Amino acid sequence: MDTLLLSRLQFTATTIFHFFFVPLTLGLSVLVAVMETRYARTGDETYLKMTRFWGKLFLINFAVGVVTGITLEFQFGTNWSGYSAYVGDIFGSLLAIEATAAFFLESTLIGVWVFGWKKLSRKAHAAVMWLVAGASNLSAIWILTANGWMQHPVGYALRNGRAELTDFAAVVFNPFSLLQILHVVPAALLLAAFFIMGISAYHLLRKQHLDFFTRSFRLGLTVGAVTAIWVIIGGDMHAKHVTQVQPAKLAAMESLWDTTARAPVYLFAAPDERNERNRVEIGAVPGVLSFLGHGDFNAEVKGLKAFPKDERPPVLLTFLSFRVMVGLGTYFAVMMIIGVFIRKRLQENPWYLRLMMYSIPLPFLAHTAGWVLAEVGRQPWIVYGLMRTADAVSPIAASQVAVSLAAFILVYGLLGGVGYYLIGKYARLGPDAVGSPAPVRGERLRPAAV
Amino acid sequence: MVLESIWFFLWGLLWAVYFMTDGFDLGIGSLLPFLGKTEEDKRAMVNTMGPLWDGNQVWLLSAGGVTFAAFPRVYAVMFSSLYSALMLILFALILRGVAFEFRTKVESPGWRKLWDACIFIGSFTPALLFGVAFANIFQGIPIDQKGVYQGTLFTLLNPYGLIGGVLFVLLFVVHGALWLAAKTQGDLQARAAATAAGIWAGEVLVAVVFLAASYFTTGLYANYLAHPLLFAVVLITVAALFGIRVFLARKAYFKAWFASALTIVGATFYGVIGLFPNMFPSSLNPAWNLTAHNASSTQLTLTIMLVVVLIFVPVVLAYQAWAYNLFKGRLTAEDLVY
């Protein structure tokens, strides 16, 4: 294997792994802040317990998310030096702004939140969690802005053998990034909501801590119902924009080979890239792809054959990841609609709770599928239409990358295993294992009930 | 020209602040197996940096990000040339970060031993390798015209590079021991202070060797000889280094820590000033050096980033100062969260 392939595998592995942890951080930080705010407002001890319990799971997840993020910032330089030198003028500034304007706040205040229970008032401590949540999501917005630029480069000119910034506002308000933000940020909240509902379902099925986990479940349900719909609307808006600016990606998403009016979506199809056709096509729903891409059932959609062979993304992976994402997104919405109807009778519907419990991994899978679609669908470009991935790789020995890739697989495998083992352990132990609620400054100390 | 020079010094400043802040974390982590005799000692050591290390570490990301934004070619060539060394640093920092969170999550001595080992390796390795990397940058890296590295990881492990690595380890270990002395009490504090005093002597010795070796193996002194006033930086650094000993003798541990912080910032700037305007010099041909002038971003990007940094870095410093102040004073039993 050569440096290019190894570097691509390494980037894939490290990014997907990192993004197992990021959306939970983004979503759960907001939900924990909501719980703590309720505690600060009402003084209700259950909300304090909820803050502590979900906060503990949040922190284990946060630790793995943070450390694996460092890798990503450095990898552009270590493995993609061609890319870094070519677009650093624009892309580098977005990463630097992310670190300076958002990640600093998140990382500094997370320490204050963990260690500051007795040093801050109730309200101030809750405010710190809001700042952590805000900074985390702001961080995500900057990273998505950077990714959006790779998907749809704007505000630049090609000079001095590189892409140079000409219009900073265009880069910051790139419509592609804005649509990604509107899709990914609610999707993170949805993932966190499913996480909370799934773990709550586990305890509700065992009839333990009923009040605690009913309240947790309902909070998850409220957030989940809103975001499940929002994600679909945001995704639809995003797809229409992709049709405009990345038509090859849209064609690959549905494995559409010939440019067609009233383009269909198939219930089942098997792409055959070599022969530029689909081996099987079953259950065509005419006009749906045209509608997805253009908002018009009769619109013409460009097929893959309209693009030179060396400018088409890998079809099968793009096609499959799109299906997984959309299928799961639909499932989430259905589950949330059911949930809203039976929200007062959760106990009487163990089948629903059981389904929700087993659904915990699904939003993680949906996020991954979404990113595979976004990134694989962009190939062969690293910056769409501007720079090929093959031209971006560092001039380094393949053996070096092989060793680091093997080390990443080993170390990340262990970290992921330990991280999820600990999250699972504390999730099962329930709120009592987190220890007595910390007395906050200004309150009298209670005897600890360990 | 002016903008690029400003950015060069901001670049140096971010690295200096990273070494100053995370330096004591790396030092304490390196001392963990030696000063942490009991589980109480170890928990105290970990918790003295508990609320702060995460925020400290972001200075590294900020330094990396700013290198990318302001000097993309330096970022590209530096990070790809130092591939193996950087990967080792990354893995080390990854292990250190999760170890803090994981070590108390399972009640078992074997479990804690595992993560304590990760904290040690994860702290010692970056301390050493940052020193090795910067010393090698000071003396030049074998990169060709296109910025392709013509060496291996072992090329970096030359005598001067290793002296740099040892110097960084000693700087950080003293820095960490002083933080411990300032933050803890009793037996641990006494041992931390004694360690700081003992290793300080080694720090002085290695610093002298490094300063002399720099004269023979690097071109760092050219700028100083051209502008002798710059030697003031070296004098301040040396004064701060001796200040550590003076304050230690008076048991003024916080003041000693500040002197150590100044020593680290001074030591970083000693190299940065000597390098200027080079950022990643080639040992093969000076014409292939990457400099602040031939590797920078456009004036537009440098201007925008300058505005961003001038707004946000003071804000960051303000809330980090607030956080440090919130956790000032000696550690008590209720501060043991990790």
Image (cartoon, grey):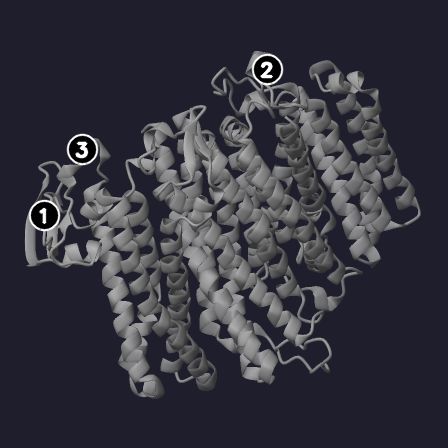
**Which chain's residue wears label 1?**
A
Determine if marks 2 and 1 fall on one subunit: no
Which of the labelled discs sits on residue A309, or is there none?
3
Q: In screen coordinates, is B168 left or right of B231?
A: left
* Residue A157: mark in rendering: none
Q: Mark 3 falls on what kind of element?
A: helix
Label 2 environment density (alpha carbons within 10 Å; few <14, some 14–19, many ≥20): some
Q: Quadrant of residue A252?
A: top left
The reply, left or right, for residue B30 in relation to residue A12 is right
Q: CA distance from mark 2 to mark 3?
A: 44 Å
Dot label at residue B283: 2
Residue A409 pos. (x, y %): 40, 43
The residue that label 1 is drawn on is A260
The total number of labels drawn is 3
Q: Residue at x 24, y 60 (%)?
A: A326
Disc 2 sits on a residue from what chain? B
Compared with A237, B179 (above or below) is above
Secondary structure state at the residue bearing disc 2: loop
Closest to the camera, between mark 2 and mark 3, is: 3
Residue at (48, 82) in percent of width and height = A212
Camera-side mark, 2 or 1: 1
Disc 1 marks a residue whose amino acid type is Thr
